[in-house]
Image (tube, rainbow, N blue to C red):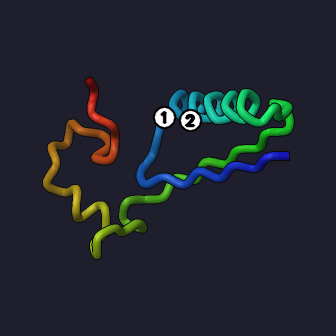
Amino acid sequence: MPFVSIRMAGSATRAQKAGIVADVTRSLVERLGKNPAAVQIVIEEVSTENYGAGGQLIVDRDAHLAPSREDAHAVPPR
């Protein structure tokens, strides 16, 4: 039984998390031939106040970003 643990800084909507679960499950089914019912996925949202990179908290590093931008780590739209 595959067990996938995903840890991310910040938060995601329920719909986004459902999409992640569907995508990861589909990948394990297609690439490894796993039974989708056996795929277990846990998503852990870590507060940006509790996550650091490059010697500083993410919340402090991203404080200068415009408030309209939800996720400083998101892939920019094409």
> Which percent across, then down, holds residue 36?
81, 30
At label 2, counting other C-alpha atoms closer than 10 Å, the crowd grade (few under 14, some 14-19, many 20 or more) is: some
**Which secondary structure, mark 1?**
loop
Q: Residue at x 69, y 28 (%)?
A: 26
Amino acid type at circle 2 is Lys
Against 28, residue 30 (above or below) is: above
Say which residue label 2 marks.
Answer: 17
Mark 1 → mark 2, Cα distance in angstroms:
6 Å
Image quarter where the C terminus lies is top left
The residue sitting at 70% across, 44% down in the picture is 41
Query: Is label 2 in a helix, a strand or a loop?
Result: helix
- Residue 54 occupies which quadrant of the picture? bottom left
Q: For the residues carrying marks 1 and 2, which lies nearer the camera in this image? A: 2
Name which residue lies at 69% across and 49% down: 4
Say if 6 sits above or below 19 in the image.
Answer: below
Which corner quadrant of the image does residue 70 belong to? Answer: top left
Q: Position of residue 46 (x, y in %)?
A: 48, 58
Residue at image coords 33%, 37% = 75
- Check whether the beta carbons of the residues at disc 1 and disc 2 lie within 8 A of each other: yes
| Viewer-nearest residue: 32 or 40 | 32
Name the residue at the front extreme. Answer: 31
Q: Nearer the viewer, residue 11 or 6?
A: 6
x and y percentages locating residue 25 in the rendered image: 70, 33
* Mark 1 Cα shell of 10 Å, populated few (<14), some (14-19), many (≥20): few
Q: How many tags in the picture?
A: 2
According to the picture, the residue beneath numbered tag 1 turns out to be 13
Q: Position of residue 61 (x, y in %)?
A: 22, 62
Label 1 is placed on what type of residue?
Answer: Thr
